[in-house]
Every structure is written in structure tokens, then in C-alpha cells.
Image: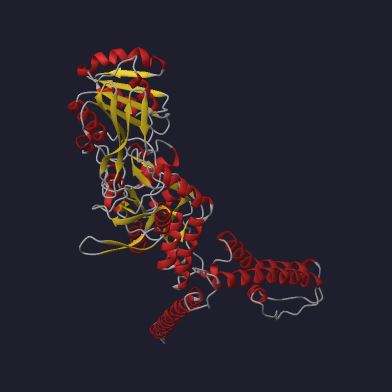
Amino acid sequence: MLGVKADDGGLSFLLTLTSAPHIYLVYDNIAQGVAVTLLPTLAASPTTSTPAFALLRRVLMWGSHARPPRTVLTLCAPNTLFSIFNQVKEYRLESTTVQWVAVVGQDLTRAVARQLREGTQVVMVQRVTSQQAFLYTSRVQQDGTVRFEPMGRWTGEKSSVKGAIRQSYADFEGRELLVTTVDNWPFVKIKEFGNGTVLPVTGIDLSVVATLSQTLNFTYRLTRPPDGKWGVPEPDGTIPGMVGQVARHEAHFTLCELSITSLRETVVDFTIPYYMESTILVSNAPQEKNRAFAVFSPFTIRVWLCLCLVIAGIGPLLRLLTRIMVIFLHHPDRPHYSTNTLAFNLYRSLMVQNNLIQTQSWVLRSVFFSWYLFSFYVYALYSGTLTAVLAVPAYEAPIDSLQDVAGAHARGYTVATTRDSSFEEAFKAAKQGIYQEVWQLFNHKNRNLSFLPAPASGFDMILKAKYVFINAQINSLLKASQQGRDKYYISRQTFLPQGYGIACPTGSPYQPVFSAVLRRVSEAGLVYKWAQDEENKVAQKGGSSGHVRPTAISLTHLQAAFFILGLGFSIASVVLCGEVVVRRWRVRADGVQGQVQSQGAKVNASSQRVLRPINFQ
């Protein structure tokens, strides 16, 4: 029907249009006779022929980047050809490794062009006669539409082909590209207007796209996803955020710290990573510990108990020693110090006061000497440690690793990260280990508490409540410096390395060109230099360094000392009141006893008068 025969030069010419090792023949009932004629000739190459599109769809979806170049030769009626390219668009089968060669019998350039998207490279062979054909190739124009341009003709065994079959993207010739992004400094800082206009301000990724624009000669216009999300494919098939816009060809590529993940790669194509970093934990700055009892902090409870026992026992011990000296040694000095006197003087030595006891006994002198050394060591250690404790603030235990997150959650912390981000995807996909344990700690009943719309929201929540936020390292460090480094705590341990790339539509022909430029930019270290520039901007604005300096000792530090003093006076007051009560009770008891004795004397006197003997003489 189309005038293609196995023994003519037409087939040989079609094969010269491609160097792909794999050729797939797609035909319908109208061209079945021609296809049967071609199949024996194509037997030298791996060939697939079927009237059903499902098989071809499965073949084309087998990893477009991992497979070698392929050519799909179509011998179909116009309606079948339109249906094929509609399904290519529906199933996002565009690929840089697939070259389409459509053999038609009439001029279908305009009709087919309306079915194509950028990424589907088509060579149309319009057969005029059995020995003549016109060749057209699809090109993307300045306005982004696809059109067919003449590239030559074939007449018998001669052909004249002008220009490259594939469109080169080394020069976009000033074409305007639509870039989707979100406001996420330090990578992208944008300014939005009421009419929907989005203007770039500053950021690492803006420097990246500016380099791409200058190198590849294109301009760009920013847009923002309506939902403000990064985006990841949902179980119901929807794709939100920036990734969704690119997957639906609503934007040419993304620009905003977008992590390369296996789930996102099912709907878009990523460039090579241009920036690598790890993930960290951000939480409230650890609160300073309560110093109400800071005077007790130099020693542990066990040490304090031992000191109390030694102080309480040294007095009776020396009293026993002096009695032994007097009784058994008949010591001429005859020490007669009481237990209270001995205990009080040794306590004075512990408080760096002089000992008022004077003795000629070498036994007591040896005991006093060892006690002086003991008191010196205790005092030196206590005073030095106390000075350090009071001068340098002491803080609560920080959240330094994923292992600390469970303890923080038990203390009332909320575990959070960015919604629809690579962080959520990584923890959600974990089936075991620490990632799976942390995933259980997120608030799945009220997702708005644990899955926040943007990193900036996480830093705001940290200042309002107890939050531990999982975020990228450079983003966290610069945001913390911008808002006050002393307000946040950045974990020392890192985890979950991330690679940031530019997401392009599936089969995007300019994705390899972007990757080539980004490779040179990364190898030159420019991305890290731009990150340092953003950090310097924060430093110039007076960002907090977060260094902790020794502070002067205040009343807060010594409140325990005043508490002890007040406690001593309180005990003395209670003892005084007790002594007064006892004294009065004794006075009353003595008064009652005196009255009883007086009345008893009177009774005795009366009895003597009554019992006085009577003289009967």
C-alpha cells in the first residue's frame, strides 16, 4: 500500500535514518501485507511486531536510560498513528533513546505535530511515489510548540538529507523556559506578587539556573506550585507539588533543593546531582539546668553521704581516743576535751578555719595533720569544681542522633519533617531499623503537627513548642544563623545523605545537556562557593554565632547557699520555740510541785495540832 518493498531501496534508506541496534515495527491491518514483506528483511535486528500497543508500551517503559537507542518504525493508517502518539503522551513514554520513524502516504505534519510533546523525536517519511519521498523532522519552536521542518527528500537510490535528525539542545536560541520552585532560602528566595508573578531574589539554586541560562542561551520564568509542595507520587496516582507540574509538562524543570529519590524517578527524569549533603536534627536550644542546688553539684550524693558520716563520727572517735590515752596510757597531758569541742574544731578545719585545740600529744597531732590534709583536698576539689559549675552554664541533654529521638519523644517532643519530602519518603519506606522506629514516633493521627509545609515552618514551631525537626544540613545551619543560632541546637551526628538534582519531564531531550553543564559546575566547586556566599550574607547581617561565654555569678547561682542559711535560721527558730515551751512547762511543773509541797506542809501541821496529846490529869 505504501510502496515499500523488501527488495527496493526504500527499506535500505529507512534503515540509514537510524543507527539504533533495536528496531520495533508497529503496523495495523491496512499495512499488514507490507509488514509481512518487511519482517524477513529485518530479521537481522531484534524486531518486535504486534498490532497491539500494550506490548510496545511495556518495551518502551523498560528503563529508557538503561537501554540502548531504539527505533520504532510505524506503518499505520493516520487514525492509528494519532492513537499511538496520544498514548505516548498519556503514559509519558517520551525518551531520548527512542527515535520514531513514521511512514505515511500523505502530508500529516500538522496533524501529528498537535499530538506530540517535547521529548518525542519523530522523522516523518511521506511517500509520494514508490521512488520518491519527502522527509520531515520534529522540532521544538521558540514558543514551545512542536512543528515538522523539511530535512530532505529521497528519490530512488539517491537521498539528500539536510541538518541533523535529532534536535540539538546545546543552544536554546533564547527560548523561554518555565521553572517551578518554592520559597526555600538559602536555595531559593523568591518574591510573589498578587498577579501571580514570581521574581527571583537570591539563593544557591538561582545561581545554578543562571549558569545554565548563560551557557545554553535560554531565559526562564518562575512559577510556584499551587499547593506549595515539593511533591512525590501518591498511592492514588496523583502527583502534587513541583514534581507533579514537571511530570504533567506544566513546567520545564524544577529548581529548589529537590532530592533525587527512586519514587520520584518513576515520574520524572533527574539530572546528575549537583550538590550532596546529609540530614540533621534541629531542636530547641537545650535549657539551662536549674541552679537552685548548684552548691551541691561538685560532689555526688555518695560523696556527700560519706562526708556527713565522717564529720559526724570524727568527734566521738577523738573523744574515745582521748579517753584511751588517759585510762590506759596515763597521759600526763590528761586531755579532757568534750565530744562537742572536738567535733566543732575539726569542722572548723574543714571550713578552712584554725583549730583552737592545743595539745602536746603526738597521737592527736597525727590525727589533726591527716585531717588537715583531708580538709585541704576536699576544699580544693569542691571550690574549683563549684567555680567551674557556676561560671559556665550547664544545660539539659541535647538531641544529637536518631537514637536520642525516642527519649526526646518521651519527654514531650514532637517529631516533625517537611511534608511530601524525601525525608518523609525515606522514613515511611523503612521496614526495620532505626528509621522504622522513628517513623512510628511521628504524629500520624494529626499529620499537620508532624508533617509541615516547609522548613521555615519547622523552625517557627521549634521556637513555640518542643519540636525536633528533621531537615537538610546547609538549610538548617543557615536558617538557624539567620534567626539566631543560640535559639536552636543542631545535632552533631548526620544521617541520610541527599543528592539534589533538577527534575525534567520523562524523556526530556535537554536533561543530558543540563547534566553535562552541572557536572562541570560541580567539579569546579561553584555550588559550594555559592553556598558560602549565602552564609557570608548572614554573617554580614550580624547573625548570632551561638558561642557560650562564662557569665557572672548571680543570685540564681547562690540561691541554694541562701536556702541553707535560711534553713539553719529556721531550725534555730524552731529549737528556740521548743526551748521556750519546755522552759515554761518546767516552770509550771515546778510551781505546781511547790504548791503541792506547801499544802502538804500545812496539812502536816494541822495534823500535828489535831493529834496533840491531851493531858487528863
Question: Is 136 on the left-hand or right-hand side of 340?
Answer: left
The answer to whether 612 is drawn above or below residue 90 in the figure is: below
Question: Is 506 on the left-hand or right-hand side of 194?
Answer: right
- Which of 24 and 560 lies nearest the eye of the viewer? 24
Rendered image quadrant of residue 96 = top left
Rendered image quadrant of residue 580 = bottom left
Picture coordinates of residue 162, whole percent (x, y): 37, 37
Question: Is 265 on the left-hand or right-hand side of 194?
Answer: right
- Which of 270 and 484 lies nearest the eye of the viewer? 270
Can you say which quadrant of the picture contains the N terminus? top left
The answer to whether 336 is drawn above or below residue 41 in the figure is: below
Can you say which quadrant of the picture contains the C terminus? bottom left
Residue found at x 45% / y 70%: 543
Can the viewer see residue 613 in this picture?
A: no
Residue found at x 39% / y 49%: 171
Can the viewer see residue 17 in this picture?
A: yes
- Which of 554 and 548 lies nearest the eye of the viewer? 548
Label tally: 0
Residue found at x 22% / y 28%: 81
The answer to whether 219 is drawn above or below residue 21 in the figure is: below
- Which of 39 and 490 lies nearest the eye of the viewer? 39
Picture coordinates of residue 600, whole percent (x, y): 41, 81
